[in-house]
Image (cartoon, rainbow, N blue to C red):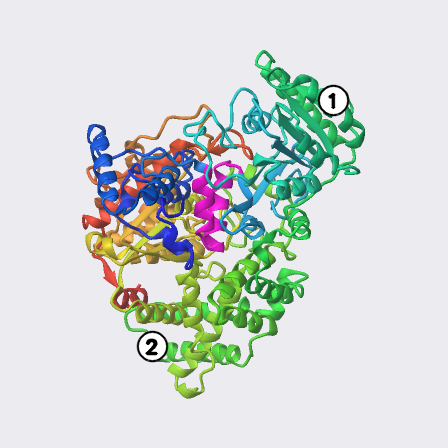
Amino acid sequence: MLSLLGLEMYQAQKLSLQDSLQISSDSMKNWAPQAPKDLPWNFLRKLQALNAEARNTTMVLDVPPDTRPAEKESQVEEEIIYWDTADDISADIYSFSELPTPDTPVNPLDLLCALLLSSDSFLQQEIVLKMSLCQFALPLVLPDPENHYHTFLLWAMRGTVRTWGSQPPRAVGSFREDSVVLSRAPAFAFVRMEVSSNSKSQLLNAVLSPGHRQRDCFWHRDLNLGTNPREIADGLVEISWFLPSGREDLDIFPEPVAFLNLRGDIGSHWLQFKLLTEISSAVFILTDNINKKEYKLLYSMKGSATKYYFILSPYRGKRNTNLRFLNRLIPVLKMDPSHVLVKVSSTDSAGFVRRVRAIVAHVTRAPCRRVSVEDMAHAARKLGLKVDEDCDECQRAKDRMEQITRKIKDSDAYRRAELRLQGDPWRKAAQVERELCQAQWAGDPPERCRAELRHRLLELRTQQNGHDPAWGLQEFISGISSPSLGEKQYFLRWMEWGLARAAQPRPRASPETMLTLRAKHRGAVDFSEPLWPEPLGVEHFLREMGQFYEAESCLVEAGKLPAGQRRFAHFPGLALELLLKGLPLELIDGNTLSTPLRWVTGLLKELHVRLERRSRLVVLSVLGVPGTGKSTLLNTMFGLRFATGRGRGPRGAFMQLLTVAESFSQDLGCDHILVIHSGGLIGGVLTEAGERFEQEASLATLIMGLSNVTVVSLAETRDIPPAILHAFLRLEKTGHMPNYQFVYQSLQDASAPGSKPRERKQLLDEPRDASRATVQMEHQGGGIRTLAGLAFCDPERQHVWHIPGLWHGVPPMAAVSLGYSEAIFELKRCLLENIRNGLSNQNKNIQQLIELVRRL
């Protein structure tokens, strides 16, 4: 199977996340796989794009059907020439007939298992996360029949976080967000014994589907290629959850419930079945026949606390034999006649599903076992299953993370005590640097004024340099300095989750205050000091490293510190390693609204050294106010890892690096794409005047000025945000205008009736008050100009996109809409096409980018 899918080469050196994210010529094609070797890459690309059809393994053969039989005959004849004896011929023919051939359709579950067996831990985690967003059932126990061991995928599940509601809605704490690994819920397992005329997966999908909308969470026999025999996927255990929305009219169950599905027969996969009986509140066994072997296995479960239910199709099996064995099992498994359900072809399917749901609801209402995925992993270890998280590198990284995070009781207090160079010291230094810059461009300012500013900056930097890195920062630096690349990556992931669960700051205003302010300002509220403080994250440790480097560099430049006495010169190299492995690095500090220029320059210089001959860059930026779907758009388009959700991520602008495949770099005209995400830097309409607006407009100008391509993400207001419009007006004067795309993202789900896509003309109409004020600021005395009057808004060059709503249905059980996925792919294709055709600003190398950062 691995050979058929072209995955044999990834057994010693596993397929990595970076391998799967490379930009290639296939990134611009909506292509169909033509051979089995195309299937893994097609699956990964569609999964990255959150495409609901990712599991479809249908191939479009590129050879005309009428020529294929002749080709196959000639190939067989060619093989026979080399067979010496009749015995060899018969043996080889027998072997050949059992192997899958390039024409054989591949079962999607075989593809999934083969890909997971060929992927490293971080790609496995990404695959599971994307499957979760697509509402696919997730792999929990991965079989490996070749090596006779099975792996419990605890680490692969770590990154999956879900949100659900409680009833009644709008109560205090009515919504909860937690990792699926840590949250406890009753679990129900569905297994097959011997042969069953009823499909477990179809039954599970019906139980999980609200109303008449069928959800294909578990792949089943009625789907395309669902009847293809499984070659390697038998023994796979899948898991999915029902998560309530908090609405009684929609929720099937009032609390989260886990559902488990064992692929294959319990007699052949007794270890997995044993695990399911130990972690489940109830087990549903589907069968047509109960034979002596399975009866003995079930009899050995005597004394189990798990409830057992049988779903039979008696007319297809040996009815009397079934009844005899059931009567013996009822007292052993503590069952009663209500635990035996009969489903035949004439059974009302909807009524049967309601009955199964009623059993599940009854079990959950009574005292029952509630388990997390971590609890399941503990049970798996006891049974001798391998747990992916138990490798030495992962555990060492976890121990280091716990040493750091256990000291965090209050994140604000921790930042003041341990991350001392941020906050006030950095804010003051940034302000002085800003004044120095303004003085430099003010014409002919008094030298005395500039000397005073330089002296103040030197004093502030000397104070910063007088500190030593605190213990927590030293431990963090040790973690990212590990000689083991795997341990370094494990440590970063553990830190992200550990900090997310550490004590986080409380809101600076009550919900009532926030509602009052929204009502007063008609829903548009933006504050220079946010109501919800920024959560503590990995970026704060990196920001502290940046400030140590900035302070030291400033003193070296001023001649106050010999270059030979530098202690932090290696910091940019450490941070660069993280950028190359997919971690976003900060370009603009969202707290001080300033750029740590020496730190960013140091990073880019290290990048130039590392990339050597492959240093041609295209810079792609995305700007917009918070809540317009920027992070989700980038993550879906390129597989990036920007934090999603209003208030979830840091407030600064961050950059990530995408590699272009060498085979495609000449055609595209660049070796890498640097993606800049404006985060929460751009505010709403209340920031249209004053110092903060000027800062936001300057930062938008900086980001767009660095960019070859800019995407402006818009939501329900028709106006371009004032700070971004201001940046366009400034750049129009310089002639440095990036290729731009305006993206309107619907905030409604795809199944809901909504407003029509906005017309291109609406962006070119007379601007409303906020944008009008901005235009007046840039064109004093020139009157108010409409957007249509600006050179950069030439209707012939205008690109306005309408992206459908992300969700199809009501979260948290909604799947990503196919329309959203397809629209994002088209936008991606257009952006890459523009880069290839030279419609963006001239591509730059890293040396040119460093100079452009300094000038801007």
Q: Residue furthest front?
A: 86
In the image, taking residue 647 as reference, residue 227 lies left or right, namely left
Task: Residue 243 in the image: state x and y as whole percent.
Answer: 61, 35
Q: Is residue 116 visible?
A: yes
Which range is magenta? Answer: 109-137
Number of other residues with Cα within 10 Å of mark 1, as a class: few under 14, some 14 to 19, many 20 or more: few
Q: CA distance from mark 2 to mark 1?
A: 103 Å
Task: Residue 745 in the image: state x and y as whole percent.
Answer: 40, 37
The residue nearer to you, when weighing 40 against 607, is 40
Magenta stretch: includes residue 551? no
Q: From the image, tell me which residue sits under label 2.
A: 446
125 is higher (above) or lower (below) than 743: below
Give the mark nearest the N terminus, 2 or 1.
Answer: 1
Tell me the number on the disc at residue 324.
1
Name the image quarter holding the N terminus.
Answer: top left
Q: Tell us which disc is closer to us: 2 or 1.
A: 1
In the image, taking residue 261 as reference, residue 483 lies left or right, namely left
Task: Residue 550 in the image: state x and y as whole percent.
Answer: 44, 74
Name the image quarter holding the C terminus.
Answer: bottom left
